[in-house]
Image: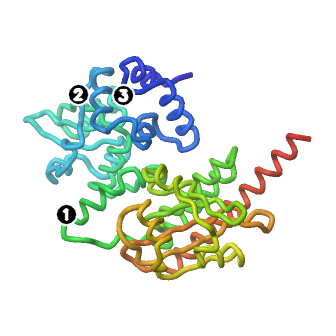
């Protein structure tokens, strides 16, 4: 069944039937709400989607600018625990009226409970899923699920730079990495197809790395396939290299082992980095995905401002091994079904 919001967007001429179908297929693989996937595909802007949702649902909108620079005194009206529980971000106070962006603005029970908790009349506003989860992380330090980390990541970096120049990305702790692997293991165990397994791998890799490209290995060539942040995938899919021209990739493919070190200085890597944008990396890692003793793909991943820790290296190597195992299991399942 098609998403009702999706049908509304088609009816109003914002997207086409084919674009809706593409977004729905992507939603099945990536998860999240339809709007999140439409934004990631570049089919609609965030504020445009909020405006349309507001009109359709007859709920006032909370635009990007409404959730910028929120007064700490207003944020303090709702505790971190309640902000996380209700998926709510307060952003404006007018006398006894508290305006909030709420993930479920039509849930009257939640609105009533928030009014009782805060002592204010709650005026629920609609925003997009990714924006609310981003605001919860930014203002309340509520960690976003892996699925949403890349969508507004460039924006997060801009805020960090505006706050005092270029700042180091916060390295995940060993506990963060273990937690991410635990989540990924559950997803790999129930993966239904190759895309499921690969999507989990890239989401997991993004916990420890700023950027990444997964290349397919075919004969003597590398073909750009998937990336994080996902917004660069269309550029990444244009990449094609001879493996022999990239000695570090060739070594990783031939040895079936990872490479770690500073970025090589040659035109081929410059082309690769141009597809990702964001400047030269501090360190790169190449991790092969091996199935039945053959390298089928290689992950290029890098960090922009920090050296890669031993914990993070073990983390990505473990993730690659689990991805290979998940893919091998899927191959066996397909063989069983074919017989």
**Residue at 72% of width from left, 55% of height from top?**
327
The location of residue 303, given as percent across then percent down, is 43, 72
* Distance from Cα at disc 1 to Cα at disc 2: 30 Å
Q: Which residue is mark 3?
A: 107
Nearest the eye: 299 or 97: 299
* Distance from Cα at disc 3 to Cα at disc 2: 14 Å
Label 1: which secondary element: helix
Res. 60 mark: 2
Instruction: Say whether residue 66 is visible.
Output: yes
* Distance from Cα at disc 3 to Cα at disc 1: 36 Å
Instruction: Say whether residue 203 is visible.
Output: no
Could you classify mark 2 by the number of other residues whose Cα lies within 10 Å: few (under 14), some (14-19), or many (20 or more)? some
The location of residue 245, given as percent across then percent down, is 59, 74
Q: Quadrant of the N terminus?
A: top right
**Residue at 57% of width from left, 71% of height from top?**
315
Q: Is residue 52 above or below residue 243?
A: above
The location of residue 313, given as percent across then percent down, is 55, 76
Nearest the eye: 228 or 29: 228
Q: Are marks 1 and 2 in contact (CB under 8 Å)?
A: no
Q: Are marks 3 and 1 in contact (CB under 8 Å)?
A: no
Sequence-wise, which precedes: disc 1 or disc 2? 2
């Amino acid at each position: 069944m098609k998403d009702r919001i999706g049908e509304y967007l088609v009816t109003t001429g914002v997207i086409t039937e084919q674009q809706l179908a593409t977004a729905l297929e992507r939603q099945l693989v990536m998860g999240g709400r339809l709007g999140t996937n439409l934004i990631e595909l570049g089919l609609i802007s965030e504020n445009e989607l909020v405006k349309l949702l507001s009109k359709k649902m007859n709920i006032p909108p909370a635009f990007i600018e409404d959730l910028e620079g929120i007064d700490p005194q207003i944020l303090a009206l709702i505790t971190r625990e309640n902000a996380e529980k209700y998926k709510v971000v307060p952003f404006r106070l007018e006398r006894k009226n508290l305006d909030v962006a709420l993930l479920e603005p039509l849930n009257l029970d939640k609105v009533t409970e928030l009014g009782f908790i805060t002592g204010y009349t709650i005026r629920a506003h609609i925003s997009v899923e990714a924006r609310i989860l981003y605001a919860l992380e930014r203002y309340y330090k509520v960690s976003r699920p892996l699925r949403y980390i890349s969508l507004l990541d460039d924006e997060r970096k801009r805020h960090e730079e505006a706050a005092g120049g270029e700042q180091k990305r916060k390295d995940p702790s060993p506990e963060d990495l273990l937690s991410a692997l635990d989540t990924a293991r559950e997803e790999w165990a129930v993966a239904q197809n190759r895309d499921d397994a690969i999507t989990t791998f890239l989401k997991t890799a993004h916990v420890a790395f700023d950027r990444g490209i997964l290349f397919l290995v075919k004969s003597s060539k590398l073909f750009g396939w998937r990336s994080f942040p996902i917004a660069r995938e269309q550029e990444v899919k244009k990449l094609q290299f001879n493996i022999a021209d990239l000695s570090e990739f060739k070594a990783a493919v031939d040895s079936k082992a990872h490479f770690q070190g500073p970025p090589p200085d040659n035109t081929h890597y410059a082309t690769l980095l141009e597809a990702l944008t964001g400047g030269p990396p501090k360190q790169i890692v190449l991790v092969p995905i091996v199935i039945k003793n053959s390298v089928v793909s290689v992950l290029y991943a890098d960090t922009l401002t920090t050296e890669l820790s031993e914990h993070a290296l073990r983390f990505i190597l473990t993730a690659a091994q689990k991805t290979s195992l998940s893919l091998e299991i899927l191959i066996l399942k397909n063989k069983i079904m074919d017989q």
